[in-house]
Amino acid sequence: MLLGRRGEPGDPVSVDSTDTSSDWRLPVTLLGVMTIGAYGLVLYAFGAFVGPIRDDTGWSSTTVSSAFSVSALLGGLGAIATGRLLDRIGIRPVAVGSLIAGASLLWVAASATDPVWFVLAWGVGGGVVSAGLFYNTTMAATTRLTPPAERPQAFSWLTVLGGLAAPATFPLAGWMVEAWGWRDAVRGMVGFLVVCSLPAIVFVRGGSARDAPTHPTRADEHHGFADVAAALRSPTVRRWLVAVAAAMMSLVAIQVHHVPALEASGLTLGAATTLAGIRGLLSLPGRAAGAPLVSYWGTVPALRLTYVMMGIGTAALIPGGSFVWAFVIVTGLAFGTVAPLQGLYAAELYGPRRIGTLMGMQQVVMSLATAAGPFLLGITVDLTDGYTTLLVLAIALNVVALAVFRSPASARTSGVPSTP
């Protein structure tokens, strides 16, 4: 929702249940730009810092990488708190607090001369940013800022912008490191985060529970669960959390291990990284395809198709050879559709009543799966001296995700209240 309430002279128009489709475009665009800064620094740019930090300080790769692991876990755990705040007070206070605290601690990490202080400062700072500025908050806010009929398009647009984080920040962080050294590069990327976040902080507000449509359409008749406990009593929600955990374990394990797996199939490192870059670019049209898929088939069939594509594409990497192109194309497109479709499913399942809190609950599960997937599946590489077992397990996890989740409508037929 933009600054001001409808009818206040000189203020932009706020979003309510009678708004046209154009009203959500600016706030969702600004939330997407904020997402670029958050994911770009905490998730992607970190990869450009690991080697320079290790070489400059003498700290081990394990020590430096542990800062990333701490931020991922704390971000997941903190997502419930930021989700509850979002439900109560809206997106602006959550974004302001997360930006100030997170950026300050990441700035401290850039000056750390002791590895323990670096891990703590980056881990907590990155965790605050991920808890308050990642998709768990921007998707929840988007749910409340858009009419139900427009949400597929809004979620696709949000995630298309978010998908620019990797291609934008990898080269930017690399250039900063080469020009300034890693410490000033971290500070520069903190500045990038601030620049990306300020427009949303200034111009977007709302997104709290009171901003849910007061006259819901039929698609919003399910106002949702009252709290986490009520949601977890629903078999549909429990099934969904299993599905999203399985899917994320597979997706992130493939994301982390696919370059060495491509090398193991006979490609050079240069060829493998080039294909990885192509795969990343293909995620952008994949994200844009989310809205048409939902319009044509509905959220559940579209999401099931995505899990099928991830499984088939992963299987193509097992024989190697020319099949690697099928892996690159199919999983690249499917990877792009996962985020918007899982976000849309969650919005339909949880309803707008406590969407921030419940997206936070889901983020905890996703963070644990993100941390566990590459490690647990990666163990098989050492045990078998190859990637076949890892790929088979990744396929099996997609089958689990495909099989266990149900239509969100089943939650509304199992005792979920239909009034706020």
Image (spheres, rainbow, N blue to C red):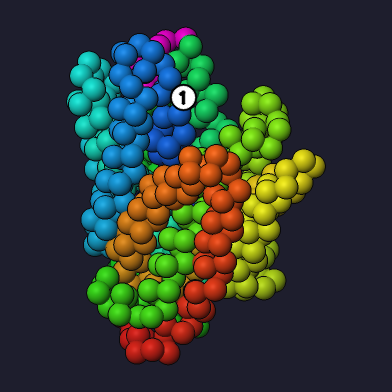
Res. 279 image quadrant: top right
- The amino acid type of the residue labelled 1 equals Ala
Q: Residue at x 39, y 60 (%)?
A: 140
Total count of labels: 1
Residue linked to disc 1? 48
The quarter holding residue 355 reads bottom left
| Image position, residue 157 (x, y; %) | 57, 52
Of 282 and 238, which appears nearest the observer? 238
Name the side, left or right, on which 319 lies relative to 350.
Answer: right
Q: Residue at x 30, y 19 (%)?
A: 59
- Position of residue 27 measured from the top left corner of the image (x, y, whole percent): 46, 51
Q: Is residue 158 magenta?
A: no
Residue range in magenta is: 179-186
Q: Along the line of sight, which residue is nearer the eye, 23 or 65?
A: 65
Judge whether 283 appears above or below 140 on screen.
above
Image: 113 above or below 332: above
Q: Position of residue 247 (x, y in %)?
A: 50, 59
For image coordinates 58% across by 44% down, the residue present is 387
Q: Is residue 54 visible?
A: yes
Q: Residue furthest front?
A: 384
Quarter holding the N terminus is: bottom left
Q: Residues within 10 Å of mark 1 (few under 14, many from 20)?
A: many
Residue in the image at 42% along x and 67% along y:
242
Could you say which is closer to the camera, residue 42 or residue 120? 120
Q: Tell me if residue 370 can be seen.
A: no
Q: Is residue 154 left or right of residue 54?
A: right
Where is residue 371 shown, x and y percent of the image? 38, 47
